[in-house]
Amino acid sequence: MATPALGPSSREVIVKIGLAADKITVDENYFEVSKSLNQEVKWVCAQDHKHGEDGPCFTVDFETNGSPFYESQFSSDAPVSGLAKRSVLAGPKVYKYTVRVKGKDDLDPGGGVKP
């Protein structure tokens, strides 16, 4: 399991999303946020282009088995997850999500919550 890169503050777990050779790329196949450290995910665009020209650069949807966060959809316009829900227990559950970039649906990376 890869260890996600921490952002400018140790509260942010950065996950980069891009498009290379017409394929969606996500630099972390699995992220973990810590409830005790009040961590949150920040999805960022790894593409070199202007944002806002044709809507969001990317969207992230937790559809399959729920979201560990209070919201279930994020985008380049609203990229920060916020804290994990109080009701979510740390543990082995994997929260799968779909990434969409420029009309393409791909990947079903996952994430989890740790103490």
Image: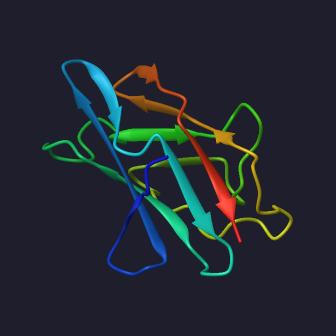
The picture places residue 66, in percent across and down from the top left corner, at 76, 42
Residue 40, quarter of the rendered image: bottom right
The picture places residue 85, in percent across and down from the top left corner, at 76, 65
Residue 36, quarter of the rendered image: bottom right
115 or 84, which lies in front?
115
57 or 52, which lies in front?
57
Total of numbered circles in the picture? Answer: 0
Residue 26, quarter of the rendered image: top left
106 or 37, which lies in front?
37
Name the side, left or right, on which 66 lies relative to 22: right
Q: Residue at x 65, y 53 (%)?
A: 112
Name the side, left or right, on which 53 lies relative to 8: left
Give the residue furthest to the left. Answer: 48
User: Does 16 appear above or below 24?
Assistant: below
User: Does 72 appear above or below 85?
Assistant: above
The picture places residue 43, in percent across and down from the top left corner, at 41, 54
Q: Quadrant of the C terminus?
A: bottom right
User: Does 104 appear above or below 28?
Assistant: above
Name the side, left or right, on which 7 lies relative to 81: left
Name the side, left or right, on which 105 lies relative to 6: right
Q: Residue at x 76, y 63 (%)?
A: 90
Q: Residue at x 76, y 46 (%)?
A: 93
Q: How is the image coloured?
A: rainbow
